Structures are given as structure tokens and as C-alpha cells.
Image (spheres, rainbow, N blue to C red):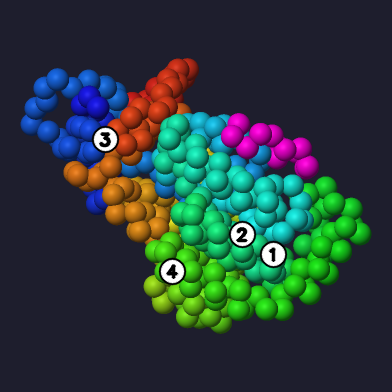
């Protein structure tokens, strides 16, 4: 792989921001920051743009919409994987964890057969992909039928992150039965009778869930696969998950729960869409409040890849966090949570996953993305107003 010299960049390091600086890439690795000189390298003039580590997205289920854009309308799975790969490159996400739900045969892509085929399709596509696609399997603990399916995927090496979730009504994301019914009718085109039947079945299937969760998490730990709990809603739930060896807490419902997670060493994962919208779609805690309270470890795009870079810059603008600290929420912190020691920071010797960003007004827009030193996305934004011109240069 030829060397690349990225120059005239504003570089976000783990603890500082360099202006009008440069990085040298060789053989997919960050060879030097502010090198004294370069020879035989391709020069890329970033013209003052901001250079960040490639984003790491530990939870995004956008792949499900690529596979099933309308309820019960399924596209070929290799087509879906190829499209979401391109979306992530354009969003600056160089390590996406595609969140796949295993929920028996409730609806569309969120069933065991389709989800397992999709997980294997992601793995098979990796030799062609633009970015480092990974699989995040989400186990619905009320589904006994998913156990052997997930156990097989774990042993095959087709799972990069395992989370456990309970979407039965009356707790977690769905605090009331009505909230659950409205979600099922709105998101999955179910009639009220169909949604009520699913709710009854889910509540009945909670018997034996604790043993299934313990068994599955133990297998993941034996294989060295990171684990997470989903929609934790109490201090007691955090304690239970921590005792089972879970290594991160996704979407804690309230500030007390997030605080409990952090106090016992569990990184928290909050939604970037929540940051942009200023609120949770399910009435849970505002992510920006968790950031301000110091209990937000990572941001994930949840269901919309393009929100991740925008949320990081929004955090820098709306809180006391420095730009490096805000960027760490989508780079270094998720890398640490997922045990990825080779990326997440612009440091010599690490993998050259990088993103160049320009500002259009208040909008951070990805112009270039490199995955292991390979340019996988490039675009150019025309400056159309004096305000944009000033801010684009300042970026």
C-alpha cells in the first residue's frame, strides 16, 4: 500500500488539537504525526479540515431497514449489507457493529432465521467491504428458541458483540403495556389484536429467562466476546448484570441507573439521535443530561448512522467537554469498551482509520474516510455563502 501524507489539517489527538498539521500513513498504519519530511507519498491537502479517528458505532440497526425497508418487504441480504456498508463509509463510521435482533418469528427481519442469515452475510461480505463491518447480536431474553441459534453463531465466530434485552411490556423501554402496543402497531404494522397477542406471549415466555441469559453470557465470556445489557432501568438491574459479567450498559433509562453503571465500571452507551433531537423517543433520560453529569461513556447511532458525527460535535458545542473529549465518545471510548486496542485514536502505530470533516454552518460533514489507510469515501462540498466560507476554513 502506498504512503499518504495528509497535510494542512486540524488534527484531533486524544488530549489536544493541532492546527495546520499533518499525518503520514504507511501500510494502513499511522506512521507519524507531524513528520519531519516525506518521500514518495501521495499528498492530500485537507485545506484546514478537521481530521478525527474513524468513528466506532457499537449499536446501529440501520441494516434492518436496508433488509426490510417496509414491513414484511425483504430485499436480498447481500444487497442490504452492501448498501449499509456504503452508508457507514459516508458517515465516517469505519467500525460499525450491526445490531441484529433475535426475537423468534415475531416480524420481518427481526426473527431468528433471517437474523442469523444476515449475521453470516455480514461476515461473508467483509472481504469486499469498505469499512470493518462487525455483528452485534441482540438476544431477546423471552425467546427460548434463539438460544441454539445464537450459540451456534458464537462458536462460528460470527458474533463480535452480544447484548441481552427484555422488551416485554411494563419495564425497560416500554414502561406500560400501551407504550408497547403503540410501538408494535406503529413500527411493525400490526393490528391491535396482533400486538396484544405478542405482548401476552412475551410475558409468558419470561419463565426461564434468567438461566438462558446466564448460559449465553458465560459462552460469550469464554470466547472473549464483549457483552452488554440493554435498557437497564434500575440500580438493581445494573447490579444483576454486573454480577453476570456484562461489560457495558446500553441505553440506561434514567440518570440513577447510568450513575450506578459507571460507579461499578460499566461504560454506558447512549443514542446520538437522542442528542440531536434533545430527547428520547421512549420518554427515557435525555442523553445530553447524562453527558453533562459525566455518566455517558459512548454514543452510538442507534438507527441512523449519519447522526454519530453530528452528535459528537453537538456535545462539544453544548457541554463543557473539549473537542477531544467529545470525539472520544464516538472513537476511543467505544474502542476501549469493545476491546479494540488497535484503533480509536490518532496515535502512531495504530490502524489508520480516519475521517476528515468540514463544517457547513453548524453541520459537520464528512468529506473523506480512510479504513486501514484505504480511502473509502471522498466528497466535496461547495461553499455557497460568506458564513459557510468563513466557518469551513476555520474547521
**What separation in Å lies between label 4 and label 1 (alpha carbons)?**
21 Å
Residue 28: numbered disc = 3
Side (left or right) of 133 relative to 394: right
Could you tell me which secondary element the residue under label 4 belongs to? helix
The answer to whether the residues at label 2 and label 1 have Cβ atoms under 8 Å apart is yes
User: Which numbered disc, 4 or 1, marks the residue closer to the eye?
Assistant: 1
Instruction: Give yes or no for residue 77 being in the magenta stretch.
Output: yes
Name the residue located 61 percent from the left edge and 51 percent from the top edge: 116
The magenta segment is 68-79
The answer to whether the residues at label 3 and label 2 have Cβ atoms under 8 Å apart is no
**What separation in Å lies between label 1 and label 3 (alpha carbons)?**
42 Å
User: Which numbered disc, 3 or 2, marks the residue closer to the eye?
Assistant: 2
**What separation in Å lies between label 4 and label 3 (alpha carbons)?**
30 Å
- Residue designated by label 2: 149
Residue 221: numbered disc = 4
**Residue 285 place in picture, x, y as percent:** 59, 64
Residue neighbourhood size for the residue with mark 2, other residues' Cα within 10 Å, grouped as few (<14), some (14–19), many (≥20):
some
- Residue designated by label 1: 145
Instruction: Give yes or no for residue 271 being in the magenta stretch.
Output: no
Q: What secondary structure is the magenta-colored segment mainly?
A: loop
Side (left or right) of 249 relative to 294: right
Amino acid at each position: 500500500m502506498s504512503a499518504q501524507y495528509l497535510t494542512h489539517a486540524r488534527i484531533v489527538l486524544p488530549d489536544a488539537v493541532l492546527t495546520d498539521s499533518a499525518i503520514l500513513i504507511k501500510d494502513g498504519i499511522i506512521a507519524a504525526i507531524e513528520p519531519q519530511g516525506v518521500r514518495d507519498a501521495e499528498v492530500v491537502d485537507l485545506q484546514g479540515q478537521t481530521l478525527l479517528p474513524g468513528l466506532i458505532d457499537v449499536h446501529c440497526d440501520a441494516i434492518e431497514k436496508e433488509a426490510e425497508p417496509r414491513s414484511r418487504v425483504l430485499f436480498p441480504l447481500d444487497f442490504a449489507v452492501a448498501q449499509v456498508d456504503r452508508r457507514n463509509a459516508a458517515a465516517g463510521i469505519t467500525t460499525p457493529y450491526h445490531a441484529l435482533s433475535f426475537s423468534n418469528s415475531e416480524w420481518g427481519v427481526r426473527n431468528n432465521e433471517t437474523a442469523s442469515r444476515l449475521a453470516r452475510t455480514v461476515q461473508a461480505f467483509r472481504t469486499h467491504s469498505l469499512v470493518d463491518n462487525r455483528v452485534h447480536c441482540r438476544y431477546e431474553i423471552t425467546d427460548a428458541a434463539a438460544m441454539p441459534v445464537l450459540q451456534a453463531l458464537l462458536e462460528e465466530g460470527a458474533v463480535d458483540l452480544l447484548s441481552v434485552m427484555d422488551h416485554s411490556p411494563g419495564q425497560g423501554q416500554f414502561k406500560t403495556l400501551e407504550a408497547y402496543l403503540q410501538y408494535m402497531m406503529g413500527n411493525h404494522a400490526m393490528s391491535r389484536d396482533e400486538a396484544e397477542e405478542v405482548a401476552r406471549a412475551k410475558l409468558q415466555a419470561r419463565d426461564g429467562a434468567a438461566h438462558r441469559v446466564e448460559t449465553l453470557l458465560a459462552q460469550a465470556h469464554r470466547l472473549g466476546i464483549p457483552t452488554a445489557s440493554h435498557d437497564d432501568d434500575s440500580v438493581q438491574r445494573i447490579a444483576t448484570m454486573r454480577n453476570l459479567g456484562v461489560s457495558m450498559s446500553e441505553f440506561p433509562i434514567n440518570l440513577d441507573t447510568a450513575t450506578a453503571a459507571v460507579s461499578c465500571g460499566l461504560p454506558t452507551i447512549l443514542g446520538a439521535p437522542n442528542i440531536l433531537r434533545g430527547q428520547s423517543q421512549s420518554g427515557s433520560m435525555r442523553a445530553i443530561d447524562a453527558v453533562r453529569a459525566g455518566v455517558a461513556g459512548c454514543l452510538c447511532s442507534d438507527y441512523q448512522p449519519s447522526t454519530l458525527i453530528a452528535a459528537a460535535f453537538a456535545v462539544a458545542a453544548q457541554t463543557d467537554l473539549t473537542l477531544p473529549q467529545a470525539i472520544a465518545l464516538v472513537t476511543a471510548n467505544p474502542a476501549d469498551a469493545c476491546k479494540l486496542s488497535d484503533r480509536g485514536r490518532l496515535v502512531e502505530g495504530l490502524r489508520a482509520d480516519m475521517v476528515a470533516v468540514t463544517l457547513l454552518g453548524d453541520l459537520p460533514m464528512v468529506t473523506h474516510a480512510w479504513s486501514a489507510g484505504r480511502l473509502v469515501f471522498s466528497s466535496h462540498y461547495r461553499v455557497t455563502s460568506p458564513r459557510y466560507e468563513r466557518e469551513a476554513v476555520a474547521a
